[in-house]
Amino acid sequence: MKISRLNIENFAIDESPTIAEETVSGDDLLLSGGNRSGKTLTFNAILYALYGRSGTFGVTPGQSSTVEIHFDNTDAVLRDRKHTYEHEGRSTKADEGVEAHIGSKEDVRLQFITANPANQPVSALSGEELLNRIRALLSAENQSQIERHRRAKHDLTHLKEIRTRGEEGPSIKQLRRDLNSLPISQTEQRIEDIKQLKELIESGEIESINARLQAKDEVAERLGELYDRQRSLENQLEQKRRELGDASRYTQEVNDLIIDAIEEFTCPVCGRLVEEKTARNRLPNRCPQCGRDRDLSELREQLREKVDSADDRIDTLKKEVGKLEGELSETRAEISELKDSEPELQDLNQFIRTALKQAEYDTNQLQEKTEAELTQKQDDLADFRAQKQELSAELNAREELIDAINESISVATSRTAELEQEAFEEIRETFTNRLSDIYQEIAPELGTEVGLTPEGQLEFPGTGSEGIRPYDRLSSGEKRLVNLAFGLTIAQFAQESEDAHDWEVLVLDEPLTNLESSIQDAAARYLREVDIQCVMTSPLDRIQSHFQDDQSQIVKLDRISTESTTLDEYL
């Protein structure tokens, strides 16, 4: 659809130009004026009519602003106090009507080429966004499928994160920790020790061992000392190893420590779990949890101090552990040597010696305690095994689910890549060829074949010995022409497609300023010849000559006199 009538009053400031063109009739329109005449304000006013404040390039309309655009199909969008869209005699909210009958801001805005290079479509779009917009234009169905697979991958990845971390239950890591922490092997060993003691009690051998220990001779006394020493060393070793493990945790990368800190938390804004990959990508400059800009240098420094301190502590602990292990080895060797010298003490070990001591060397009391402890430990073992079975089943189910999710993610990723490749070939064969042709038409002295990388970056042949040039290496004039050609290419494909947006207008803010006169003439002639309505602002008298016919109109804007305002840059 094209513009048939245009009315702009008091846009942004009271001194803004009033434009009341009742007979545009889908023809081209030139808004001509010098500096500070409101050309850019008028450009933004048209955007405001379509998409409200969010559509403009930083310009806020005044409270008394009125912008009305009537189209050649009798639709109209009215932005005053009511903000309505008129279609077939019925009135709806402006935003809803524009979205339904014209198109989305992301697509239509590509046909608005600003004077500011940073806001021009190719400059503002990332490679992925550029490909998305072109794919949607060439084949809405193809882009819809790609987006569907992308959403599926995103949702599956988030589901995997939830199922891995456990939103309402234990995480997979916790399940594994719980499973590994079950004292099954320790309990089994304890039961074996109890059974061995029970056999000694039932065979009567415990009596000779008991008597030998109570004799308190030199060997018995030394064994008692050694067993006490062994127990003390084992306790010390356990403590030191625990401290060593805790200290070692601080020697991981600082980023890992931050990730660990947020791992079990949800984002306070959206309530969703923060995926680990997302958090890691945010770490350099932003909070890994909420994504807000934040200086993490102080936190990093604090953690780095902990890491450095932990390194020193680890070295000390390792030496202490090594010394204790050596002492424990010597103690056990001496115990073994003493037992070998005393046949009646061959079956004595730390457990039996402790059991006798706790029973006050009363074998009847020892037998009762042994029977009771054996029953208790067997019950404990049965409970631990039942817990293991339950935890294993839950862990296996969770891991099988994660495997299934990973497989689905792989399918979605593969299918997305296939569709993107198919679409990319079509883009290269159709869109970039059209873009190249238009670029050569509007800039015959500069125009050349435009290339496109799979990452969505436009490329241009260099001059002389210069190789391929990416878009970022073009001159400002070349960028302006490329964006003009890009917007026109978008408009032409949209015009030819029933599934694309319905905006057959190219709105340009001083697109040809500071270009060579031959290029200005070539570009203006081409814009006037194509079947896309051109609404252009320009301060150039040369451009006016191309709009002086019955198929266009020229609106001359006078210089605006204002006091210093925040809108100066837009005038």
Image (cartoon, rainbow, N blue to C red):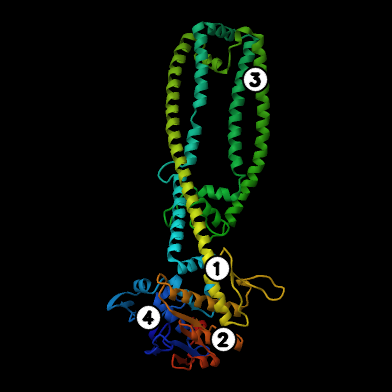
The residue beneath circle 3 is 332
Q: How far apart are labels 3 and 1 at the CA level?
A: 78 Å
CB under 8 Å between discs 3 and 4: no
Q: Looking at the image, which residue is at 44% across and 14% down?
A: 371
Label 3: which secondary element:
helix
**First in sequence: mark 4 vs mark 2:** 4
Q: Is residue 309 left or right of residue 433?
A: right
**First in sequence: mark 3 vs mark 4:** 4
Q: How far apart are labels 3 and 4 at the CA level?
A: 91 Å
**First in sequence: mark 3 vs mark 2:** 3
Q: How far apart are labels 1 and 2 at the CA level?
A: 25 Å
Tell me the kind of residue under disc 1. Answer: Arg
**Label 4: few (<14), some (14–19) or many (≥20) C-alpha neighbours in 10 Å:** few
Q: Looking at the image, which residue is at 33% across and 77% down?
A: 85
* Numbered mark located on residue 63 in the image: 4
Closer to the observer: label 3 or label 4? 4
Tell me the kind of residue under disc 3. Answer: Arg
Label 2: which secondary element:
helix
